[in-house]
Image (spheres, helix red, strand yellow):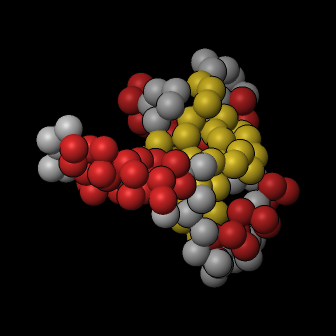
């Protein structure tokens, strides 16, 4: 608390009236840490929209995860989406922990980490899931 007061006083002293906002943004930035949970290949590439939007995908693009607890093939199913396009799924053998975290409301970020021009659909897209806290 003393650091906050000192920082705000210093910024006010040098004529910056935005001291509280600067501190708030700094505190928010410092509080957001990411922990890598897993890297996975995309399952089901060839059965969903991934082939059609392949030219638009880039390494670093953000993906979103959507739970499908009523999926008849896998109670822990997690669909992987790029914008409004369903790309595929987190592989069944790797989805249980992520499903439980999503069910608890944890904030997760998912990004493409590798794209390969490859015949094997399991090797075309690789993504990373991180927990933000």
Given residues 19 and 105, the one toward you in this image is: 19
Position of 83 relative to 70 (above/below): above
Left or right: 31, with 123 as reference point? left
Q: Picture quarter containing residue 128?
A: top right
The residue positioned farthest toward the right in the image shown: 93
x and y percent of residue 1 in the render? 49, 63
Given residues 105 and 67, the one toward you in this image is: 105
x and y percent of residue 33 in the render? 60, 49
Given residues 50 and 107, the one toward you in this image is: 107
x and y percent of residue 120 in the render? 72, 28
Given residues 119 and 105, the one toward you in this image is: 105
| Residue positioned 78% across, 65% down in the render | 97
x and y percent of residue 38 in the render? 75, 46
Position of 39 relative to 66 (above/below): above
Position of 80 relative to 45 (above/below): below
Left or right: 46, with 73 as reference point? left
The residue positioned farthest toward the top in the image shown: 117
Position of 67 relative to 58 (above/below): below
Residue 36 in view of the camera: yes
| Residue positioned 50% across, 31% down in the render | 60
């Amino acid at each position: 608390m003393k650091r906050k007061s000192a920082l705000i006083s210093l910024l006010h002293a040098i004529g910056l009236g935005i001291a509280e906002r600067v501190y708030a943004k700094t505190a928010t930035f410092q509080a957001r840490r990411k922990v890598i949970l897993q890297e996975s290949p995309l399952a089901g590439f060839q059965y969903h929209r991934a082939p059609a939007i392949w030219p638009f995908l880039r390494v670093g693009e953000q993906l979103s995860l959507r739970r499908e607890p009523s999926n008849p093939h896998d109670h822990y199913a997690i669909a992987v989406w790029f914008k409004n396009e369903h790309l595929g799924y987190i592989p069944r053998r790797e989805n249980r922990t992520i499903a439980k975290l999503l069910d608890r409301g944890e904030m997760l970020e998912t990004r493409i980490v590798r794209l390969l021009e490859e015949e094997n659909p399991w090797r075309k897209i690789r993504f990373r899931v991180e927990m933000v806290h």
